[in-house]
Image (cartoon, rainbow, N blue to C red):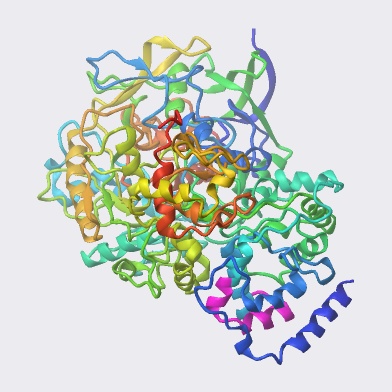
């Protein structure tokens, strides 16, 4: 029998990026807020300090900051015809756990999605005609525009202190920034990080081919920065331990460094860690959420009632919790009806490599998670798709995030995969190889979706989430086209050998690609094709907001975090200025 | 104390300044194991072995990373780090001489200070050093200065065993903004939130720790052959212009590349200066020609270099020494002298001049030429696991 706790004004499911942002906005609005985090409390001091934090075996190989698959994982299959099996060990993507969420172990790449991404279906039809979008591709508009989100992007970047260079200031294009970006209201809060040598070679090569290279916007900071919340971040030291690690230097923007200390000090906020939410409870009419039921760190079942519920877990877990709570109609791929689990998308990556002779020292170890030089000439709809027969694109960049000793062993094709020959090749090529990142979009399709697994259950006896996914043909075509462009740049970079192949199917769940899982609880303006409305408010229970990358109708070329932050501020603004004044649906069904 | 120390330094300066610049010219490419002639002026304050002198607030410099020392000298010369005596001395040195000085002191091993090992500082110092302070947003010093304050070459100096007064003064100068010559204002943001008591606690903590021995960086960081004085290459043309800011004195090896981040033009000179040093040349991954093991055996057997006086060496009847380790099975050991990776180029370098690589080894420089060392290494390479041959 669940213990009941006193009702709160709002409860947060997950205290990562979304939980932290919403916790701040809601307590500022005077609400009492309970934050439920299933993982452990942790902070820069003392948990992330050196030299322990640079334990590559513990953090990168054994995934110390990731969700424990022995307690909860998901099952995977390629198509509805296959039987899904549980993922016992994360590989393709790495959902985090613990206070601060996955943003603790992110790389810090901080892009804004573009108007073409937010209004993708409309823009594609306008530009190429109604028949251009391939059959079975279920991309749709987000219900919010880039112009509407600009103030929230701006606010989010100034919270994080993002280091970058504007390419479009209020409509004025600026060479050296991303000239394809939507107009931004002001410059980045801090200047770009220093450009590594490999990136400098890339920039020259890209310029020689007529492209528009610019420094990747980074949340590993280029200089000390005090954000509007009064917290100070420090300068990145280029140690190369960002992704899969926490930052010991206060130099990476994470909930812990940009906001969480302020939230935790607020007397209206209560953090409870080790609390695993089992379900969101609805009233008997199933029209309003009444609170959540969770298992606390001592294993007791607790009911926390709340008037407002913010579901901001990792994208996949938010979708699962909706399904477990039976909120919204689960998606059915055979009929195409239902919404929860619909439009799961990923990203489409490939990695050409440029091998130099020994006179060119790339120094891959001297990097941060997000410094480097990229081009957006082939991102999104920044180029003419008319003759190409696919939609979407990729940004291309020399953005090697690290040269860590266990993980980074570039060798050319034909190298033995073990033994003396392999070791010699690693020694020969380690410091003389540049990796180019082709970071591509992912369309939603009718067959890629999330639902509950009929067989496998988690440590609490609840069904696991089942992922059904394979690369859409559209995305493989996109990868073939853009990867070739990247290889051409690689050739212009003057290496001795350029290798690389586009992404090909089938999707390999055992190879790391990217932790950019999106969709499943997507936003929109039509309840028959979306789970939440344009304010990320549930169509089914208006006092429930589902905020996160689960809301992306499909995935764009860029890294998703900044867009997620902007959406969180956008939703928070709607809650504070609209919903709290008049609780109820913010859009009519 | 501080005032009188400063006065002493200034007085000294007054005596020394009239000395002609020529006096400070050190031939480039000088062997960094010999004290550069002009270093007699360093000795006055920093001590015969670079052990420092608290009376002058002159820190211990022996064994500090070469890059760090060269950068400090460069910064003193350019006025980026302020100290009346040091600015004057540094300006008198040609840039390549600063590198020579740095290389010399980086390899010098000085006796530990008397206080080392006496940890009587408050617990607060240890906590700040190893964990930081969450409430003040201060990270652990160990993140950059290494566990036990042993430093993290090339850029982060060791703190262990530095003098209390110097550490206090240095921390205070970062805090009050009179010292700003680090990258990214790291020290200002780290020390800024600390109180005077915090600074004293940290200084006590580090002053009591034993200083590290010099870093055998040449060994752990492979160096590429062909660093030519002036060293422009096609690679440099590709992008190490001013805009490649984080980057990378090309041609210079990994360590040289790191230097390029902060020292700008100095790194090219550093690479150039090093190229001719005998102790360095052999450490570069220059292909070492195959030796002739028979000739190597002959060199050992003649006893001309005294190897057999200390070592028992299989296959050489007279070699029955017990001073050093028996060399049976040498080829299958992981380490040379217990500290260097056992591979042929390193072995050759070690044979040429053991103390240059392992400062505390009992094995002297026995005067093997490079060619002889190559042949001897070839013979030692035949001494496999069984030791029998």
Instruction: Decide whether residue A340 is among the magenta residues.
Output: no
**Of A445 and B78, the residue lying toward us:** B78
Give whichever of A295, A510 is nearer the camera. A510
Residue B81 visible in the picture: yes
Image location of residue A67, percent across then percent down: 50, 26
Q: Is residue B73 left or right of residue A139?
A: right
Decide whether the magenta segment is chiefly helix, strand or loop. Answer: helix
Is residue B80 one of those drawn in magenta? yes
Which residue is depicted at the point 63% across and 71% down? B35
The residues colored magenta run B79-100
Q: In terms of depth relative to the viewer, which is nearer, A536 or A434?
A: A434
Q: Is residue A130 left or right of residue A48?
A: left
Q: Residue furthest left?
A: A387
Left-right relation of A493 to B139? left
Residue A569: x and y in percent read 51, 46
* Quarter the N terminus of chain B occupies: bottom right
In the rendered image of this protein, does residue B337 appear above or below residue A528?
below
Q: Is residue B139 above or below residue A174?
A: above
Q: Viewed as shown, does residue A212 lie left or right of B33?
A: left
Q: How many marks?
A: 0
């Amino acid at each position: 029998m669940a213990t009941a706790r006193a009702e709160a004004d709002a409860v947060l499911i997950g205290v990562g990026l979304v939980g932290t942002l919403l916790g701040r906005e809601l307590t500022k609005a005077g609400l009492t807020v309970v934050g439920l985090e299933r993982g452990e409390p942790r902070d820069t001091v003392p948990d992330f300090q050196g030299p322990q934090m640079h334990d590559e075996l513990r953090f990168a190989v054994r995934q110390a900051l990731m969700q424990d698959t022995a307690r909860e994982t998901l099952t995977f299959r390629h198509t509805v015809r296959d039987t899904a099996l549980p993922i016992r060990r994360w590989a393709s993507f790495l959902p985090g756990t613990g206070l601060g969420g996955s943003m603790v172990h992110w790389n810090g790449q901080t892009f804004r999605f573009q108007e073409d991404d937010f209004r993708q279906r409309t823009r594609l039809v306008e530009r190429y005609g109604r028949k251009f979008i391939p059959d079975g591709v279920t991309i749709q508009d987000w219900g919010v525009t880039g112009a509407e989100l600009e103030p929230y992007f701006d606010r989010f970047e100034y919270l994080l202190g993002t280091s970058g260079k504007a390419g479009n200031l209020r409509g004025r294009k600026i060479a050296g920034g991303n000239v394809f970006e939507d107009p931004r209201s002001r410059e980045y809060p801090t200047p770009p990080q220093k450009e590594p040598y490999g990136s400098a070679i890339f920039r020259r090569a890209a310029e020689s081919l007529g492209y528009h290279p610019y420094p990747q916007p980074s949340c590993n900071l280029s200089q000390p920065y005090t954000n509007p919340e009064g917290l100070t971040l420090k300068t990145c030291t280029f140690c190369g331990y960002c992704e899969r690690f926490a930052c010991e230097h206060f130099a990476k923007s994470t909930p812990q460094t940009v906001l969480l200390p302020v939230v935790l000090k607020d007397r209206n906020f209560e953090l409870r860690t080790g609390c695993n939410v089992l379900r969101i409870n609805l009233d008997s009419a199933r029209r309003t959420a009444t609170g959540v039921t969770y298992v606390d760190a001592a294993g007791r079942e607790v009911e926390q009632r709340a008037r407002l519920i913010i579901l901001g877990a990792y994208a996949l877990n938010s979708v699962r919790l909706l399904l477990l709570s039976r909120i919204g109609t689960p998606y059915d791929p055979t009929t195409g009806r239902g919404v929860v689990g619909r439009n799961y998308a990923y990203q489409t990556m490939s990695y050409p490599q440029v091998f130099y002779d020994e006179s060119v020292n790339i120094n891959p170890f001297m990097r941060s998670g997000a410094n480097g030089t990229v081009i957006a000439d082939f991102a999104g709809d920044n180029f003419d798709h008319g003759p190409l027969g696919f939609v979407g694109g990729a940004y291309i960049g020399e953005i090697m995030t690290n040269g860590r000793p266990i993980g980074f062993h570039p060798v050319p094709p034909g190298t033995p995969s073990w033994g003396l020959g392999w070791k010699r090749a690693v020694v020969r090529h380690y410091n003389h190889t540049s990796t180019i990142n082709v970071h591509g979009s992912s369309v939603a399709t009718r067959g890629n979706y999330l639902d509950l697994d009929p067989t496998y259950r988690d440590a609490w006896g609840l069904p696991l989430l089942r992922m059904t996914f394979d690369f859409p043909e559209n995305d493989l075509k996109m990868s073939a086209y853009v990867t070739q462009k990247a290889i051409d740049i690689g050739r212009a970079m003057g290496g001795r050998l350029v290798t690389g192949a586009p992404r090909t199917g089938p999707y390999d769940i055992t190879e790391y690609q990217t932790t950019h899982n999106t969709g499943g609880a997507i936003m929109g303006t039509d309840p028959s094709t979306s789970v939440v409305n344009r304010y990320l408010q549930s169509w089914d229970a208006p006092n429930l907001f589902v905020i996160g990358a689960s809301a992306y109708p499909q995935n764009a070329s860029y890294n998703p975090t900044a867009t997620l932050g902007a959406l969180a501020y956008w939703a928070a603004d709607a809650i504070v200025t609209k919903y709290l004044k008049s609780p109820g649906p913010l859009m009519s069904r | 104390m501080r005032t009188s120390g400063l006065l002493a330094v200034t007085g000294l300066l007054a005596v020394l300044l009239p000395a002609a610049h020529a006096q400070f010219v050190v031939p480039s490419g000088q062997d960094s194991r010999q004290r550069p002639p002009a270093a007699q002026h360093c000795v006055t304050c920093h001590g015969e072995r670079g052990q420092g002198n608290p009376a002058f607030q002159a820190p211990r410099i022996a064994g500090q990373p070469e890059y760090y020392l060269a950068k400090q000298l460069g910064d003193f010369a350019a006025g980026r780090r302020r100290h009346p005596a040091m600015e004057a001395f540094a300006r008198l040195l040609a840039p390549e001489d600063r590198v020579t000085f740095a290389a010399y002191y980086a390899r010098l091993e000085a006796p530990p200070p008397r206080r080392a090992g006496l940890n009587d500082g408050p617990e607060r110092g240890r906590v700040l050093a190893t964990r930081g302070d969450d409430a003040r947003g201060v990270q652990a010093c160990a993140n950059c200065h290494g566990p036990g304050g042993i430093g993290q070459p090339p850029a982060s100096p060791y703190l262990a065993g530095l003098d209390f007064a110097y550490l206090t003064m240095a921390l205070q100068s970062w805090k009050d903004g009179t010292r700003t010559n680090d990258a990214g204002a790291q020290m200002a943001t780290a020390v800024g939130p600390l109180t005077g008591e915090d600074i004293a606690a940290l200084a006590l903590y580090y002053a009591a720790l034993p200083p590290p021995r010099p870093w055998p960086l040449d060994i752990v960081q492979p160096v590429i052959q062909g660093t030519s004085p002036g060293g422009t290459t096609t690679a440099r043309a590709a992008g190490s212009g001013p805009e490649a800011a984080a980057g990378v004195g090309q041609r210079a090896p990994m360590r040289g590349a790191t230097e390029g981040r902060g020292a700008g033009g100095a790194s090219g000179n550093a690479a150039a200066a090093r190229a001719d040093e005998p102790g360095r040349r052999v450490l570069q991954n220059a292909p070492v020609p195959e030796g002739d093991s028979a000739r190597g055996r002959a060199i050992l057997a003649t006893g001309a270099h005294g190897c057999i006086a200390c070592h028992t060496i299989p296959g050489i009847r007279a070699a029955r020494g017990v001073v050093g380790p028996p060399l049976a099975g040498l080829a299958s050991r992981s380490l040379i002298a217990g500290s260097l990776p056992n591979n042929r180029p390193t072995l050759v370098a070690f044979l040429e001049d053991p103390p240059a690589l392992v400062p505390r080894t009992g094995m002297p420089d026995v005067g093997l030429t490079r060619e002889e060392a190559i042949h001897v290494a070839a013979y030692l390479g035949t001494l496999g696991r069984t030791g029998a041959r």
